[in-house]
Image (cartoon, grey):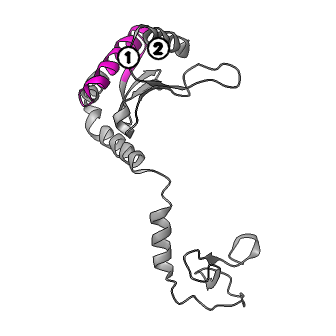
């Protein structure tokens, strides 16, 4: 049989006025199926699949745009040094975000000469041994009320079974600078 658990492939219609099994046997289903084959008159398999595809995207528009930005970076930015990539992305930010991004860039790059930088999904990111350690996500990227300073899996911030990997950031002050320096130092240790 062609379906899951020995059942033939069938389609559940939630938009059908009957709101039940429509009885449509999909292509590739069991040829021995002898159940009801009456198809709901308002059902179109092609229309149903187009609606399913349109309504079940796993990504938001902002996430799709970030992926497109990453593809653009791969094409256009590969000729630029990491510093040039990050400088261009910072220049595209709002003035408040530029101030935070520049301060973070200075702090992170000052922690260790082994840290390198380049963009990652359209955001300034900082690498150790070609693995992303941390990144700055401007709030305007996803229409958020705050920017984010975050860490990736390569960062060694483990603290038991529960620890923070990203931090909301509204402005840069001495306390935030100290925290960022401490966290990045721990992340690369």
Q: In whole angstroms, how far apart are the C-alphas of marks 2 and 1?
A: 8 Å
Seen at 37% across and 39% down, the residue is 143
Q: Height in image: 88 above or below 188?
A: below
Secondary structure, magenta segment, majority class? helix
* Depth check, front residue: 174 or 83: 174
Mark number for residue 180?
Answer: 2
User: Is residue 180 in view from this perspective?
Assistant: yes
* Depth check, front residue: 117 or 158: 158
Boundaries of the magenta span: 91-117
Dot 2 falls on a residue whose secondary structure is: helix
Q: Position of residue 30 (x, y in %)?
A: 68, 82
Q: Are marks 2 and 1 in contact (CB under 8 Å)?
A: yes
Dot 1 falls on a residue whose secondary structure is: helix
In this image, 111 relative to 183: left or right? left
Per the image, the residue denoted by label 1 is 104
In this image, 23 relative to 149: left or right? right
- The image quadrant that residue 70 belongs to is top left
Seen at 46% across and 77% down, the residue is 47
């Amino acid at each position: 049989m062609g379906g899951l658990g020995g059942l033939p492939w069938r389609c559940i219609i939630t938009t059908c006025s009957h709101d039940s099994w429509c009885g449509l046997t999909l292509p590739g289903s069991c040829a021995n199926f002898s159940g009801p084959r009456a198809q709901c008159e308002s059902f179109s398999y092609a229309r149903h699949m187009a609606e399913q595809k349109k309504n079940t995207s796993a990504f938001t528009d902002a996430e799709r745009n970030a992926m497109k930005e990453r593809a653009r970076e791969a094409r256009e930015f590969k000729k630029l040094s990491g510093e040039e990539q990050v400088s261009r992305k910072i220049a595209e930010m709002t003035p408040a975000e530029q101030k935070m991004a520049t301060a973070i860039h200075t702090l992170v790059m000052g922690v260790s000469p082994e840290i390198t930088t380049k963009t990652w999904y359209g955001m300034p990111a900082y690498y150790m041994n070609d693995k992303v350690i941390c990144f700055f996500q401007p709030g305007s990227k996803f229409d958020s009320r705050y920017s984010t300073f975050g860490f990736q899996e390569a960062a060694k911030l483990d603290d038991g079974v529960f620890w923070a990997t990203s931090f909301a950031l509204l402005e840069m002050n001495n306390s935030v600078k100290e925290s960022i320096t401490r966290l990045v130092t721990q992340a690369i240790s």
